[in-house]
Amino acid sequence: MERIASFQVDHNKLEPGLYLSRRDGEVTTLDLRFKKPNTGDLLSNGELHSVEHVIATLLRSGRAKDAVIYFGPMGCQTGFYLLFDSRQLTDEQAVELVKETFAAAAAFDGPMPGKSAAECGNYVNLDVELARTQCGFYSGLIRDWTAEKLAY
């Protein structure tokens, strides 16, 4: 089998940040890395799930909602992937969108989106404060990020 692109990144050297993971035609995937891999320092299930609900809601109801294809957690519990339509957003615009969205999530002052049995299959581990805390951390981490810094 072919070795997939994400397995070709040396995770021993990878630091938290914002990276260009891959391009598949008109779909660009960004790697939003919160934790340093291979350290045992992982996002908890509640943190992953809570950030996912808030950020996905903000992205899918925001100014670039038509460009957003997917936002969700990495299986390794160290961050998230954002897939977007590169016909609608440049890399520079996507970086700004991520920065704006995480800053907004850090200040989010509403009820947790999708926190009911009818809306989510595991709504019990959603916590808006966990989301705000992790989004505040990541917002600070990428505050000065630019498209030029997207390379692994």
Image (cartoon, helix red, strand yellow):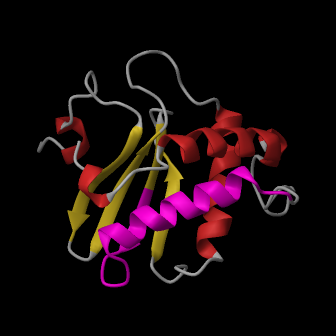
Q: Would residue 144 be found to the left or right of residue 117 on screen?
A: left
Quadrant location of the C terminus in the rendered image: top left
Q: Is residue 40 above or below residue 10?
A: above
Q: Residue at x 52, y 58 (%)?
A: 99
Q: Residue at x 59, y 69 (%)?
A: 59
Q: Is residue 127 visible?
A: no
The quadrant holding residue 84 is bottom left
Q: Residue at x 41, y 68 (%)?
A: 94
Residue 64 belongs to the span the image colors magenta: no
Q: Residue at x 68, y 60 (%)?
A: 104
Region rendered in magenta: 82-109
Residue 90 belongs to the span the image colors magenta: yes
Q: Is residue 36 above or below residue 86?
A: above
The quadrant holding residue 8 is top left
Residue 127 pos. (x, y %):
81, 43
Residue 140 pos. (x, y %):
56, 42
Taking depth in this image into account, of 50 and 116 the one nearest to the observer is 50
Residue 124 pos. (x, y %):
84, 42
Quadrant location of the N terminus in the rendered image: top left
Residue 128 pos. (x, y %):
80, 47
The furthest residue to the front:
144
